[in-house]
Image: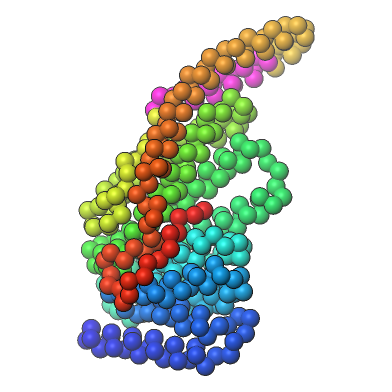
């Protein structure tokens, strides 16, 4: 029965390639790109076509005129399929396209297809429910990441926002992405197959990149916390608490991935966690900012000389505290820089073919970018 299914899948792919070859070349359709997408997302769950996957990435980087035909080809393939293998390979391919750092791709916003309610239609639902869940969670992350990339592109064009608030909002988005990433994992032993483990290798790289950016962003913001307003400092504290919680969740996630055999999880550096002393000092600062606001409102009727003296005293007091908290967060930032310099994934792949077979020796390009 399994042999029959595999033979049937090969025939489906060959038929799709033949039909694509007969299509006319237009602004939306390119037979060569369609064929490469079909081959890169074939029904074979035991191998990955690295050659055609790489061809797709090269087309995207070569010219923006290839972007529309590529999106049409991937969308057409994803909307028609009821195979979890094709759907997962399509998401892996789309993940690579999004990370190619091409502006025409960054402008798409939401993904041009919807797998939020995907269900495999070729196998027993009792066996494929975990694959379905994995695909839906993977899709949710990619869709949200694509939206955020577009939003950031638009904000850079015209929005004039304070630098600290801008960084805080970006951190909030990154933490949301990390939440989505930590949901992506096999729910049962049935899903721990080579293709899923390949996808997990790419997820690990993405997690390392995003969590590193979150920690670096928090360190930079908190070093300069005294230039922030009370609302910004309060928001910073919320983000720091969330980062602390996510650090604990990430440690458990990496441990789980190591247990199921995700190769990149074995190389994941020690998770840098937010220093507890720094969090307590930040809470102290916010409380004192509140007290300072109350005192300043009471003393508004005082003379200018008194106000100047009060401000001078507060500045001297703040300078001392800034030195204390800055030392701790700068040390945190230095630790992060060391981890970044020792990044084990600097030359890694979104799908380093370590579990699945390949039909060639070419490698995929590095896809860490945001």
Is residue 90 visible in the rendered structure shown here?
A: no
Is residue 313 visible in the rendered structure shown here?
A: yes
Q: How many marks?
A: 0
The residue that appears at 28% across and 77% down in the rendered structure is 124
User: Is residue 66 rendered magenta in the image?
Assistant: no
Residue 359 point in image, percent of width and height: 31, 77
Q: Main secondary structure of the magenta part?
A: helix
The region drawn magenta spans 276-296
The residue that appears at 59% across and 33% down in the rendered structure is 232
Among the 4 quarters of the image, the one containing residue 135: bottom left
The residue that appears at 38% across and 60% down in the rendered structure is 349
Residue 242 point in image, percent of width and height: 44, 39
Among the 4 quarters of the image, the one containing residue 332: top left
In the image, residue 30 above or below residue 308: below
**Colour setup of the view:** rainbow
In the image, residue 152 above or below residue 85: above
The residue that appears at 72% across and 10% down in the rendered structure is 308
Task: Give the camera-side residue of 221 and 118.
Answer: 221
Residue 89 point in image, percent of width and height: 39, 71
Is residue 257 shown left or right of residue 340?
Answer: left
Among the 4 quarters of the image, the one containing residue 298: top right
Quarter of the image for the N terminus: give it.
Answer: bottom left
In the image, residue 309 above or below residue 155: above
User: Is residue 285 rendered magenta in the image?
Assistant: yes
Residue 330 point in image, percent of width and height: 46, 28
Is residue 363 shown left or right of residue 223?
Answer: left
């Amino acid at each position: 029965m399994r042999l029959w299914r595999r033979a049937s899948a090969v025939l489906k792919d060959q038929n799709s390639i033949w039909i694509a070859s007969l299509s006319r070349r237009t602004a939306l359709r390119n037979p060569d790109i369609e064929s490469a997408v079909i081959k890169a997302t074939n029904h074979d769950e035991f191998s990955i076509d690295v050659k055609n996957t790489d061809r797709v990435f090269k087309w995207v980087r070569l010219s923006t005129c290839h972007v529309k035909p590529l999106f049409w080809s991937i969308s057409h393939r994803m909307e028609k399929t009821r195979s979890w293998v094709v759907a997962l390979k399509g998401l892996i391919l789309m993940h690579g396209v999004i990370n190619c750092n091409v502006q025409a791709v960054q402008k798409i916003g939401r993904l041009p297809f919807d797998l939020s309610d995907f269900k495999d239609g070729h196998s027993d639902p009792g066996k494929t429910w975990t694959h379905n869940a994995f695909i839906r969670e993977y899709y949710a992350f990619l869709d949200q990441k694509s939206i955020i990339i577009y939003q950031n592109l638009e904000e850079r064009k015209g929005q004039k926002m304070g630098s600290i608030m801008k960084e805080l909002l970006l951190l909030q988005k990154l933490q949301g992405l990390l939440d989505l990433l930590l949901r992506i994992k096999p729910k049962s032993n049935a899903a721990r197959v080579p293709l899923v483990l390949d996808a997990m290798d790419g997820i690990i790289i993405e997690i390392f990149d995003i969590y590193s950016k979150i920690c670096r962003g928090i360190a930079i913001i908190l070093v300069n916390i005294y230039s922030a307003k009370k609302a910004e400092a309060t928001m910073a504290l919320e983000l720091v608490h969330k980062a602390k919680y996510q650090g604990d969740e990430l440690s458990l996630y990496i441990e789980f991935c190591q247990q199921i055999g995700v190769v990149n999880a074995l190389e994941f550096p020690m998770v840098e966690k937010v220093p507890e002393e720094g969090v307590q000092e930040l809470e102290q600062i916010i409380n004192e900012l509140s007290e300072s606001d109350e005192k300043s409102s009471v003393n508004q009727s005082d003379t200018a000389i008194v106000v100047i003296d009060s401000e001078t005293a507060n500045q001297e007091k703040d300078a001392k505290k800034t030195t204390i908290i800055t030392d701790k967060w700068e040390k945190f930032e230095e630790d992060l820089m060391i981890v970044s310099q020792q990044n084990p994934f600097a030359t890694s792949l979104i799908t380093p073919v370590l579990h699945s077979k390949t039909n060639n020796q070419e490698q995929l390009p590095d896809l860490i970018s945001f």
